[in-house]
Image (tube, rainbow, N blue to C red):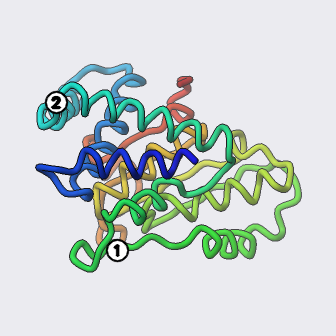
Amino acid sequence: MQVHEIVECIKKISGSYNPYVVFSDWVKMYAISIQNACAYDHGEVWKQREKMYQETAGKYNQNELKDFCWMSGLLAECFEENGINDYLGEIYMSSGAGSKITGQFFTPFHISMLNAATSLSDVTREEKICLNEPSAGGGGMILAAAKILFDKGINFQKCLDVTAQDLDWNGVYMTYVQLSILGIKAEVIQGNALLEDSIRRNIPEEKILVTPAKIGAII
């Protein structure tokens, strides 16, 4: 399965950097490449992200960068061939990136599914659903909601509109990548939902990633 191949690739790249760093750099570059490819404005925030991408990529040799591209393709295949799941959360934990030291552990997807099934039990037709996730993690709860809607025969790409937030950039990038691949309309924000107003106008642009579906682009 693609997840196993990605995990093995992360372990292979891990040498000078541990699996947590390799995983984090991969999802960061993946997220930036999607966001900047879809951005209409190539202003200061776009340039900052391009610089961040180049600096991160500069840590690795050409073969390792090819591996990152290969992993990105495999992740897209996961969704296309195996359906909706929190693949990045699974990869994170299986690769050894999660540990007591980092303090990050992602909710098993079947638990997210149970929560989503309860929350969306009354949804019977296609209607606009605004989902606010103040602690997104890798986006597992949102992905579970999309799967519940899909299983009900409801087009989540049309009816679901998401605002997701997480204090950790790693979670922001993971959520953004997975929601982008699935074509979910979303704004993914870095910040503390307990301290900040999640209304877009009050948050600096550089802390907001907007999925291609929300922008109106196709990837």
Label 1, label 2: how far apart the Cα atoms are: 40 Å
Residue name at image x 29 percent, y 37 percent: 29
Which of discs 1 and 2 lies nearer the camera? The answer is 2
Which residue in the protein does label 1 denote?
194
Measured along the vertical axis of the image, is residue 43 above or below residue 116? Answer: above
The residue located at (53%, 25%) in the rendering is 219
The amino acid at mark 1 is: Leu
Residue at the image position 65 percent from the left and 51 percent from the top: 84
Residue pictured at 25% horizontal, 59% vertical: 20
Horizontal arrangement in the rendering, residue 115 relative to residue 135 (left or right): right
Percent across and percent down for residue 203 are 30, 51
Residue under circle 2? 61
Disc number placed over residue 55 in the picture, else none: none
Image position of 198 with respect to 213: above or below: below
Q: Nearer the viewer, residue 207 or 150?
A: 150
- Is disc 1 placed on a helix, strand or loop? loop
Mark closer to the chain start, 1 or 2: 2
